[in-house]
Structure formats: structure tokens, C-alpha cells
Amino acid sequence: MGDKITTQHPAVGIQLSVGLSVLGNTAEQIRQALTTQQNSLSLSKEFIPEKQVWVGAYQQPLIETVPACLQDVDSRNLRFALTALSSIESEIRDYTAQFDRKRLAIILGTSTSGIADNEILLKQYFNHHSKIEINHYKQEMGSLAKGLQMYLGWEGPAYTISTACSSSAKAMAAGQRLINAGLADAVLVGGVDTLCRLTLNGFHSLESLSNDLCQPFGAQRDGINIGEAAGLFLLSKETAPVMLMSAGESMDAWHISAPHPEGKGAAEAMQKALDMAGVTAHDIGYLNMHGTATPQNDAMEIKAVQTVFQHYDVPISSSKHKTGHCLGAAGAIEAVICQQVLADQSWLPLHHPGSIDPELDEANYVLDAALQQPVHYVMSNSFAFGGSNISLIFGTKLK
């Protein structure tokens, strides 16, 4: 085991991790998908009546059964989480055997939970089939973390965070705080979100869905694509090859569905992350942008980056044209990407190949995947409805 980090330093080690998305389920598949321009999204007629939309649908099979203790909260969302967990479960159990179960915590993010499993039943219910019984437990936000807690047999804190697109990034920050506060020895963090009609139709009603593949910061950008993902991380005080260095958070409260136009909250989150990690903007070797491909979000995020990084051309890209916007799991799957960039030290995620908006082109978009010099710190942004902002910094060494 590695050296222990001093209690004064906020960084925590990522001991184990896994990410499942349309990119694949292995490090090699993720790298291959993000370093080529081949499209990974697919067209679907399943979600919006009489309309095809591009989605980032996970293509691999999920586990087919769940333990009896989880029947009340069984959903595709939970099965997605359990499928991800299965790939690192034995290692997690081995690692956490050294700790009291009351010192093992779970904090996860989601925005949909298991509502997709109830959508058909709810439609029937509201069409005057009032005798239909609907199990609401599976779609409650707390069911995700509580379900995994029951499965693992842990007895520490277990809760779910739902702050829309920043949910799973905030779960990682919350896990870091639990460890640094001395309230847990190890925390399973991350997030899971699955495709459902509720979110697709909701964004469609907001006129926020792209008619084509999304183009973050693009001249022709017209909205987002939706995806699904599961990303899990086991955090502890022990050092690891990749560390969660810091988290900077802010709250705009500017508008329920639009960011502050000058990116004030976004800039504040990024600066707080830098300050907490004890690094400067010039130390960041790559920035994974929130980059949803909506006109207002992209414009404000570039302003925020220019405020924080000023004349330093930090390499930037958005990976959402590859994964779709995975909503409550976006921060987690993008954290997986950042971790892999740091672990491999050979590539950066390509930005989309389309034309950049002339008003947003004064930035160092990653157009060549080959890494030109070692990267020790990367930042990942997640900005949500209501201005619930967070920036995470990951690193290969303490500073």
C-alpha cells in the first residue's frame, strides 16, 4: 500500500474505477473512441413520438437478475450500476475488508433514477387505468445509493445527489469531503443515468435537442444529444496513480434553465478548484469542457475559461459529441475520461471536427489527439440547471 496523505491536503486517491457508456467498457475502447472521429451515437425512434433523435445508448448487455433484497428498487438504472460494479466488485471487497463497514460510504449522482421502468405504467395509469399498481421505490433518487449499499453490505452513509448535469461530479466532491472530515475510510462515488422518455421529451420541449450530431462550440450548433452512462470510483486517503485533487463549487441561481451569460459561476468554480488543489491555471494540461452544444452554455463557458486561464491556451475539448450528454452521470463518465488521459499519458480527447463558432474560436481546441508533453493535472467542468456548477481537478502527483 502507498503512503498516507497528510490530513491537511484535500487530495484523495482513486483506488478503483470503471466507466460504461457508448464509448465502450474498457480503457482501450475509450481511448480508441475519443482519438478518432468515427461517430459513436445512434438514431432512435424509441423516445419521442414521430421523431428520430441521436442518442448515446450503451450497447452491451446488462446483468439479467438482481438479488432478492433489491427487488423493490430493481430498474434498468440499478442494473446499469450493478453491471459497472461487477467489473471491480472483487477488488472493492478485497480493498475495503480492512475497514469497519460503518466507515464505508456510498454517494452517487443521478437525474432519472428508475423512472424509465415506470413510464409505460404511468401512461396507462393516467389513461384511467387506476387499478394499476406502480412501485415508486425504484424511481426514487435515493434508491440508487441505498440499493448498492444493500448489495455490498456496507453500513456507513449512503445517499444520492440529484443536481441535474452536475450530480455525479458533486457526488465525487461529497465523497472527498467525507474522507477529509474523518467520517469515512473509503467512499464509492460516481453516477448512473439511463435513457428515458421523460428527459428526451423534456429537452425536446425546451427546443434544446440537436437535429443532428451535436457540435460543442460549433458554428452550426443547435442543441444537445442525450446519452447514458455509469461511472464508479472508490476513493480513500491512500495515494494512487491518479488523485482527485480538488473540487470547486458555485451556485449562480441566475435562471432555472440558463447559465449566467458572463459565466461568473463557472469561473468561480474553476478558480476555487485551482485554489483548493494548490495549483495554477498554467498547471492544467487539459480541460474537459462541459460543452453541451447549446448556444448560451457554450458561449458562457468560453468566457469563464478566458477569465480564469486568461492568456494561457489550455488544451480544451468537449467529449459530449461522442457520449451524448449523460445528464446525472456526465460528470462521472468525463472523470473516467480524465483519469484515463492521466494514466495513459499519450492522448487527449479530440474535439468535434466541425467549424467552430467565430466568436468562440480563440481557444486551443484539441484537433490532434497525440499528447505533445506530459500532463500532470486535468480539469473537468460540469454546469447544471439553476447554475449548480462544479469543476474537478485530477492529478498524478501532489503539489
Image (cartoon, rainbow, N blue to C red):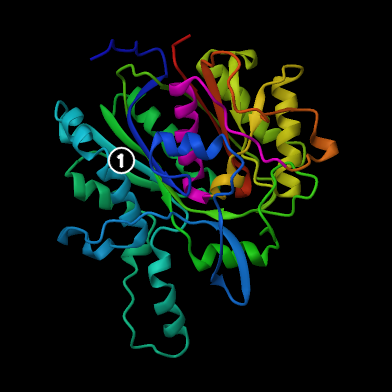
The image shows residue 322 at horizontal and vertical percentages of 57, 45
Image quadrant where residue 3 sits: top left
User: Is residue 184 something one can see in this rendering?
Assistant: no
- Is residue 376 rendered to the left or right of residue 20? right
Tell me which segment is drawn in magenta.
Answer: 326-353
Residue at screen point 62% across, 41% down = 37
Residue 339 on the magenta span: yes
Q: Is residue 96 above or below residue 223?
A: above
Residue 342 on the magenta span: yes
Q: How many marks?
A: 1
Residue at screen point 62% across, 23% down = 271
- Outermost residue, bottom direction? 128
- Which residue is disc 1 drawn over? 106
Q: Is residue 59 above or below residue 179?
A: below
The answer to which of 144 and 375 lies nearer the viewer is 375
Q: Is residue 268 above or below residue 376?
A: below
The kind of residue on which mark 1 rests is Ile
The image shows residue 65 at horizontal and vertical percentages of 22, 61
Quarter occupied by the N terminus: top left
- Is residue 359 rendered to the left or right of residue 344? right
User: Is residue 47 something one can see in this rendering?
Assistant: yes
Image quadrant where residue 190 sits: top left
The image shows residue 56 at horizontal and vertical percentages of 52, 54
How packed mark 1 is, by other alpha carbons closer than 10 Å (few <14, some 14-19, many 20 or more), is: many
Q: Is residue 294 above or below residue 312?
A: below
The image shows residue 164 at horizontal and vertical percentages of 53, 50
Image quadrant where residue 286 sits: top right
Q: Main secondary structure of the magenta part?
A: helix
Name the element at disc 1.
strand
- Outermost residue, right direction? 358
